[in-house]
Image (tube, rainbow, N blue to C red):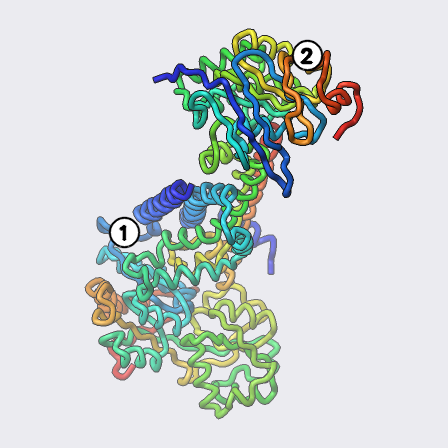
Amino acid sequence: MDFAAIFKAAFALVVGLDPGFLAIVGLSLKVTLTAVLIAGLIGLPLGAALALARFPGRSVVIVCLNALMGLPPVVAGLFVFLLLSRSGPLGPLGLLFTPSAMIAAQVILVLPIVIALTRQTVEDLWSEYRDHLRSVGLQGMRAIPTLLFDGRFALATALLAGFGRASAEVGAVLIVGGNIAGYTRTMTTTITLETSKGDLPLALGLGLVLIALTLAINAVAFGASRIGARYAG
Amino acid sequence: MRDVTSILPLSLETVSFLGAGRKLVDAVSLVVPAGGVTVLLGPNGAGKSLMLRLCHGLLTPSEGRVHWAASATGRAKRHAMVFQKPIMLRRSVQANIDHALAAAGVARAQRRERAQAALQRFGLSERATQPARLLSGGEQQRLAIARAWSLRPELLFLDEPTSQLDPAATRQIEELLTGLVAEGITVLMSTHDLGQAKRLADRVLFLHRGRLIEDSLAEYFFAEPQTIEARAFLAGDLIW
Amino acid sequence: MIRTRRLLLAAGFSAAFAGLALAQTTTVAPPAAAAPAVAGTRFIIVSSTTSTQDSGLFGHILPLFQAKTGIEVRVVSQGTGQALDTGRRGDADVVFVHAKAQEEKFLAEGFALERKPVMYNDFVLIGPKSDPAGVAGTKDIVAALKAIQEKAAPFVSRGDKSGTHSAELALWKVAGIDLDQKKGSWYRDVGQGMGAALNTAGGMGAYVLSDRGTWISFKNRGDLTIAVEGDRRLFNQYGVMAVNPAKHPHVKVNDGQAFVNWLVSPEGQKAIAEYKIDGQQLFFPNATQAGA
């Protein structure tokens, strides 16, 4: 196996901005970013509410949530697949083998991460701010906007963690998306496909882009935590 | 429509608070009229902090009731509290004040004015955009008082506000409090610092093991304490 | 407090639905080679096999179909068994596989109204150049399999209910070898598609049955080469079926049938024959052949 030739071909692909290649990268970003956005919209308030609420069985809920952070992507994919198949309960929506199905599956993967990390962050902040917030009239759920905003750096890191998990997975998007050329093919599913076809330059090129993306995310997360530390004093 | 009736006097009617099976506050009755500095004095563990929280509404009495002369709950409470360790939000100095005003329901246009007025009154204008948590301890406590003041309270609770500050910062805070009283704000504060109590108090409430055992004007209390515990405390003995 | 939480949940779910709806309306543009789609994105879903996908045939013929009819064909590739199940569940409009027995079962179950033969390619037995079973060059696949089993030479099976897998199992049967009894550590069941199975065979120096199409376009050959080819029993017939609307009323009957008709039309058959890799034709159209 000629590694030099493979790397050269991979590099050429990235630099040459091949439209098929760009479409794949674009779809991956679109699916994962949308999934993270939706998971954030649902998970941030839910996680904060969970941090503040007290009800019987709360510990059980928290343990289950933490466990769901490790949900195998392929299982999430299978679950969504069974829901969205024409023979399944949500079949009439006609969403199977579309980017929307992929987004739904990734939301399921990202949501537990967002909720669990938000709960932890908000709970810590609440124990610190509680007296003052209640003093100025923000008791119970009314404190949520304050807590979410003040926890913004830790929460941004949580969202970035969710992004990392979603952008790296292949099991879920493969099952519910069907890996359709030009329509539901992402970086990870293409890497799988091209590797199995023995077309290593393309697979590797995409792998390099994926790694670069992960590096960028981690750099941003690090920067965010540094700025956050400044405000935390 | 502004409610012009004062919330004072504040009265506690045989208020008790149970915790861990004991009465941490035991059948306390007192009245706080408008004006001046009332100091809650007593050794650590006497229940001073609990008393303040019960008055302010952060805790609910197990027995008895806390009664204000007019509506004093909800968003526009008209009484505010400053804590022993200043609680600073992870925002700028001005944003901290703005947040409290927003919580009280003040409209955006007036929030800016009132926040800036508070910054100016307490000498924090230069620090307006700095992260509040980077201020020194004394400055943070000053900000906490400024924040409470911006809410236009009739009564200000302070829970050992200078116990964590150095003497210079302590003196600054005490001067601020005197200034607030001159404006007409009633102050109810706790301290275990005898010197501070002597410097500031118009009236002393002495607590021991959750019971209010002395309640008199400051000059009488320091000159002639009525109870053994108070005498021991003033003499510098450890009592519990 | 409960009311606020419900409000939050409601807000969250409406946001989610909005997001999904939004994503549904914005689709990624089809490949540059395709003609612009008719307004409203007319498309059908075809479930086919990984070996057909891996061969690159679709990349060649589908743009031609789309240019003519304006219908975008979205291909979901799986193993044959899975592809047929996708049709059974109604998740595809057309099924295009290469396992006649399984296709006829599909037909008998009423999931399609008819089956049309389209083309054939052939299987080849791939093996390491070192040829541990000594079968290289023979034209008799059955004799070769017997030799492999007797010498316990490593053999990779796709094991995924695919058309290739079915063909492999059928050949073992013809050779009179009961796999359940004679299976040993030499028989490696990988449960994967053709490309992956080839990768694995190359990695462990094993024999593997592959369709010629995947083999020709496979780029990671390593030490592998064709050991046995040309036996009539290695021919691999492809059939196409439109899913029966009586079973699944939502399937796109007209557009699906248009695709089926095009595949067996002179135009479609010509397009299939013209697909070449390295100058070699992979698929041989035979829609008009009786009994195919």
Q: In front here: C200 or A131?
A: A131
The percent coordinates of residue B144 (x first, y second) are 58, 20
The percent coordinates of residue A130 (x first, y second) are 55, 33
Q: Residue at left 80%, top 24%?
A: B237
Q: In front here: B229 or A6?
A: B229
Q: Residue at left 46%, top 19%?
A: B7
- For this view, does A34 lie left or right of residue A156? left
> Are discs 2 and 1 both within one chain?
no
Residue underneath mark 2? B220
Residue type marked 2: Tyr
Q: In front here: A154 or A81?
A: A154
Label at residue C35: 1
Give the structural element (helix, strand or loop) at label 2.
helix
Quadrant including the C terminus of chain C: bottom left
Furthest residue to the front? B226
Q: Residue at left 41%, top 85%?
A: C233
Disc 2 vs disc 1: Cβ atoms closer than 8 Å?
A: no
Q: Chain of mark 1?
A: C
Give the structural element (helix, strand or loop) at label 1.
loop
Residue type marked 1: Ala
Q: Chain of mark 2?
A: B
Which quadrant holds residue B219?
top right
The percent coordinates of residue C99 (x first, y second) are 36, 78
Q: In front here: B2 or A116?
A: B2
Which quadrant holds residue B88?
top right
Quadrant including the N terminus of chain C: top left
Front: mark 2 or 1: 2
